[in-house]
Amino acid sequence: MRLISYRHGGREAFGVVKGDGVVDMTARIEHPTLKSAISGLSIGEMERLAAGADPDIGLGELEYMFPVTAPDSIFCVGRNYRAYHEVLEDGGPEWPSIFARFAASFSAHGQEIFRPTVSEQLDYEGEIGVIIGKAGRHVPESRALDHVAGYTIVNEGSVRDWQSKGTQNCPGKNFYRSGAIGPWMVTRDEIDDLDALRIRTTVDGEVRQDGGSDMMIFKIPFVIAHISKFTWLSPGDVIATGSPGGSAIEGTPPRWLAPGQTVSVEIEPIGVLSNTVAAE
């Protein structure tokens, strides 16, 4: 099942994607947002209600929002694929590299992402996004997926020269609307094998990234358990799990994103996240 948050007719709503339309759940269940609904364990109820309903609105008529609006936390895993040479030179890292991003550093599906005024080094990184559905702390790895509501797509855009302006990732990873999340979330039951997902990133239709989740160094259950050791995970939190090789920075010379280009990330069975680049 695909769950979406959107704007239409001056109101914010959420629902179930059915074909080329959406069954509006805002008036059908007693939750004001999708974040509230997944924390209230209402996914099964939404599936039942949508099964007997026709779409209320077409996908082409709405404005996409983040799949789950207002996440409390967005965590990212850096260099988590075996495609990176420096990751492999010493046999691989012992622990994952975790950093946080602000919600304001992302756009929704169909919105513009911004190349900042202070840099031309805007890069793309197609990633699997995990959406937490059940709160937890010190979550055992063996039960980590019980805390997952579903999965989405993340373009974890980076401003590369700003990653070296200091010792931390924070500035280069948090430029306003430099990345994207969406277009919706698919529920956990839609993906049987998390190690069999293909991530393809294209720029104006040209394939730049094409890799499999089997190359992930720290698997999703381990990452969830690891993060929960230092902080609470809350419903609606997003974890971006790392990107395969092929980012612009790896090119000679690097082919940075430029205004007017369209960058798309496809992960089946989730869908396609697409955004046009604009100058800030």
Image (cartoon, rainbow, N blue to C red):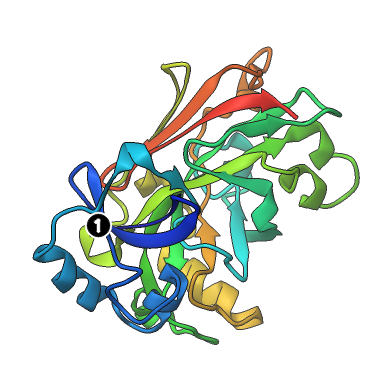
x and y, in percent, of residue 137 in the image: 55, 87
Give left or right: position of 201 versus 232.
Answer: left
For label 1, the residue is 193
Residue 225's x, y, as percent? Answer: 50, 76
- Name the foreground residue: 84 vs 276: 276
Quadrant of the image containing the N terminus:
bottom left
Instruction: Say whether residue 228 is left or right of residue 140.
Output: right
Residue at the spot 80% in from the left edge and 41% down from the top edge = 163
Front residue (pair 159, 90): 159
Residue 140, relative to residue 14: is it above or below? below
Q: Is residue 95 visible to the viewer in this orientation of the structure?
A: no
Residue at 89%, 41% (x, y): give it: 165
Work out whether 78 lies above or below 272: below
Residue 40 or residue 33, whichever sits in front: 33
The C terminus sits in image quarter:
top right
In the displayed image of the protein, which residue is found farthest to the front? Answer: 9
Find numbered disc 1 in the image and state the secondary structure of the residue it sits on. Answer: loop
For image coordinates 66% across by 13% down, the residue present is: 252
Looking at the image, can residue 269 be seen?
yes
